[in-house]
Each structure stands twice: as C-alpha cells, then as structure tokens.
Amino acid sequence: MALEHALLVALREQPASGLDLAKRFSRSIGFFWHATHQQIYRVLARMDADGWVSVTEVAQAGRPDKKVYAVSPAGERVLADWLATPTPMEPLRSELSVKMRGASYGDRAAVLDVVRANLAEHRARLAHYEQLERRDHPHPETHTDHELDQYLVLRGGIRMERFWVEWLTEYLEVRSAKDGR
C-alpha cells in the first residue's frame, strides 16, 4: 500500500487540510499506517498534480489560506481500483521477535526490559482501542456501512493488541520461571 491510498481513504471519509490529515493519522489511521507531516504534504502535492484530489483554498483570519483537499473523480477511480486489487498476505515482520529469539546471545536482562516496555505500550494501545470501542461504537448493530467498516477495523486492532499482550506476557512468565525470578 502506498500512502496515497491511505490518504484517499481518509479524504473519502472527510475532506481535510494537510494539518487535519496529520492529526487524523495520529488518532486513527496512524495506528495502521504511519506517515509524517512532511510525507503527507509531499504526497498531497503529488496527488494534486496527478489530478487525484481537488483543492479548495479557505481564507483564515490572520493566517495564510488553508488548502482543503477532497478526492476528485479520478482519485475515486484510483481508490476503487486499488480496493479491488488482491492484497498479499502480510508477513509478521517484527524486530522485537528477532530480539526475543536472539536473547541468548546477548544481555538477556536488557532484552527482557525491551519486552516489558513493548508490553506496556501494547497494553496502553489496547486500553485506548477498547475506550474508542466503548465511546464510538456502543451499538454496532445500528452502524451505517462506513461506520461498520471502521468498527470492524477497530476490532481487528483490538484483537492484534490482545495477541501482543498475551504473547509478550507469556514470554516474560516463561522466562521468569526458567530463570527462577
């Protein structure tokens, strides 16, 4: 997936400025696809040049005009084509997993600290996802198609975080029992 596709999805949900997109990435899409402000602005400029988005200038008091991007008909076709393209299975590519596997060849205590830190991050993300589920999706059976898609992706994120929490907890418990701690 290219950043362009993530931006097209975000802009189909709601037209936005580059800054608004960056904020939305940090709150939602960014959990699945990370992009910096600079990357977002650079790709928006390319998408504008390619005709995938339209830009509306909005006047602001005391500040430069704000550019608000929306998906153009050409962008809608690009997005529809990409959505219909088969997606290969995503491999598990985890630096942490490699560190856990190689812990015997280095400072195991340091690796365990890294695992504990990652476990804390996954627990925090899981708590955040579960809070979003309670706040935004108390009655998923009443959702529109778009809301249901968002809910189901959030459920996937919850399941992924539960996996990481369970697996890292297991790793730490087994290592602790083996090491007599």
Image (cartoon, grey):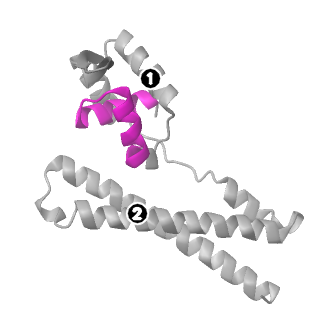
Task: Where is residue 41? Give x, y as percent.
Answer: 44, 23
Residue at left offset 36%, top offset 41%? 24
Which amino acid is tagged 1?
Tyr
Residue wearing tag 1: 41
Viewer-proximal residue, 127 or 2?
Answer: 127
How many marks do you count on the picture? 2
Q: Is residue 118 above or below residue 77?
A: below
In three-dimensional space, the C-alpha distance between marks 1 and 2, rounded to whole angstroms, equals 27 Å
Image: magenta residue range: 3-29
Q: Nearer the viewer, residue 100 or 63?
A: 63
At which x and y percent is residue 18? 37, 27
Q: Amino acid at mark 2?
A: His
- At 27% from the left edge and 16% from the top edge, which residue is drawn? 55
Q: Is residue 90 left or right of residue 4?
A: right
Residue 93 numbered mark, or none: none
Q: Of all residues shown, which one is farthest toward the left? A: 142
